[in-house]
Amino acid sequence: MHMVKGLIHGTQKRKFTELVGYGLVAPYVIYSIIFWVYPFLWGLIIAFKKWNIISPDKEFVGFDNFIKVIQDPLFWISFKNILFFMIVYIPLVIICSLSVALMLNRIKIFRSFFASGYLMSYVSAGVAYSIVFNLLFAGDGLINTWLGHVGITIPWFSDPKIAMASIAMIVVWKFMGYYGLIFLAGLQSIPNSLYESAEIDGASNWTQFWRITIPLLNPSFIIILVFAVMLSFNVFTEPYMITGGGPLDSTQTFVMQIYHQTFTALHAGYGSSFAILVAIISFTFVFVIRKMVERDISYG
Amino acid sequence: MGRFVRLSNRKRSNTLGLTVIYSLLSLGLIFMIFPYVWMILASFKIPAEIYQRFLPTQITLEHYQTIFSLGSTGSTQPFVKAIFNSLFVSSITTGSVVFFGAVTGYALARLSFPGKTFLNNLVLFQMLFPVVLFLIPRFLLILELGWINTYQGMMAPFMISAWAIFLFTQFFKTVPQVLIDAARIDGCSELRIIFKIILPLSKSVTMIIAIFTFMAMWDEFLWYLIVTKDYNLMPLSVLLGLYTRGEYSSYPGILTAGATLLTVPILALFFLFKKYFTEGITMSGIKG
């Protein structure tokens, strides 16, 4: 009798904690349905419709929007620009941030001073630093005034060949401290004993770097590469503020196109299918990079 | 003897190496800080000196005066309002992200109920999905709700963050069960347990979530650009962005003053909470 009572009490208690649990997650669940699941499904649906947001009729057009996107020269121009951005941005930001991390890892005094100094650029707002670099690198700006003393001026944002590279460079400025800290955390997790035994075996610093440091930094490389690729596909504020996509469409990006198509030209269906294709492409990139770079590291 | 010579040689090359490292780091740091210094100096320079001179020969407040008096002949001052709008939207969202993040994270970490695994997976799933996919349908939803040009419209997509829930869930798993049990025996409600016992024990993760959320909201541009049309409701980032591309594009003094206003609050936050910024980044490399 007692036991049965205890059992009933136990189930009641369990029921109660379950109810409490549901109560606590309810806001998240409701919010997710309204602002995540519903938009997600709606986005999929309107990608198959022709719709200008204003008019009530939404004609079902099958894969027409997707075909139009693929046939749109600006889609391919943006794609090419983003690839160019990545080719400049990723190696440059990795070299800069890894150098900073390696140097920070070697010093003891002033380490946190330098670390936060290099991180300062990370907190700058997109709009603010776009304004600043746009003025600094302007045709008659300070950088060109200084370069002028040695007889060169560089049309940073006005030459279609280099405009996207210039944008990549300023994004390197923003993120190198941030990635540097990720690398530094990776470096600090490498056991010192590995270097000590390599030292005894007579391995040079160079060999140690390529045989120990780089392979064991693999997890940091993965995080940074994934971040950098996602960032590249989402570039918007800098070209929007500095070049407006020009000169000659050389700084058009996917998000700028989606923005323009949907909110200026009001092609909601078209913009939606564009966004879906972009999501698929960026996922594929991330997946391929992970497959290519990810290594099982074990030491001991 | 030979050994001794080798050692002292190594020591010398070490000091040399360190000198090189410190010099390079300092040089790099100058490059990193230069844009900030230039921006702040430029905002106090007379227009003729902004482009060509690094150091000003005279200091002027005219750009800030212009910014703060813009529209003062009418009833509204868009920049003053924009600063308020940015602060308002960023603070409310930060509060909400922390509150719902903690509540949901607690349930997912410490309570058991059917469907919990599903929700944990949903959180991970939401973290992976690119924002670009939601831009248009969320805008349409806000349009349908009649929230264009409202604070709700600006904040709605950011009020609960899967990233915050994930971090809280991970961290709350490490809180000792005894503390929770003891509080329950004392008759504490679950909400009391979360906010009086668990959250104070998770100060650094809470600070990290709050700071990064505030910064992201302050910095947000695209979403605000889409949902605000009224100059009086715009956050600072959008107002400044539109002014830069529009009527003030040839007034570098006003632009740098605006950029300084947009940068300084977050920079102040950074210097106040440096520790949490570095901790937050090294924790996993969160948020891109």
Image: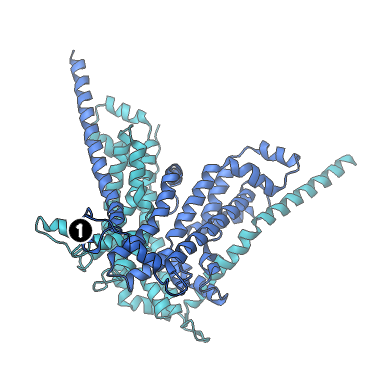
Chain colours: A cyan, B blue
Looking at the image, which residue sits at the far top? B1
Task: Please state if A157 lies on the left or on the right of A278 as rendered.
Answer: left
Query: Residue B190: x, y in percent?
Result: 69, 48
Query: Residue B49: x, y in percent?
Result: 21, 60
Looking at the image, which residue sits at the far right? A1
Kindly tell me whether residue A228 is visible in this rendering: yes
Task: Please state if B164 lies on the left or on the right of A287 as rendered.
Answer: right
* Residue visible at 57% across and 70% down in the picture: A38
Task: Please state if B6 lies on the left or on the right of A294 as rendered.
Answer: left
Snapshot quadrant of residue A4: top right
Circle count: 1
Q: On screen, A5 above or below A203? A: below
Kindly tell me whether residue A66 is visible in this rendering: no
Looking at the image, which residue sits at the far left? A151
The C terminus of chain B is located in which quarter? bottom left
Residue type at the position of mark 1: Leu
In the image shown, does B164 or A61 lie closer to the viewer?
Answer: B164
For label 1, count other residues whose C-alpha is less than 10 Å away and answer few (under 14), some (14-19) or many (20+).
Answer: some
* Residue visible at 14% across and 56% down in the picture: A147
The N terminus of chain B is located in which quarter? top left
* Residue visible at 42% across and 48% down in the picture: B270
- The residue that disc 1 covers is A142
Given the image, what chain letter belongs to the residue carrying mark 1? A
In the image shown, does A146 or A79 lie closer to the viewer?
Answer: A146
Query: Residue A258: x, y in percent?
Result: 39, 73
Q: Secondary structure at mark 1?
A: helix
Query: Residue A235: x, y in percent?
Result: 35, 63
Q: On screen, B271 above or below B142? A: above
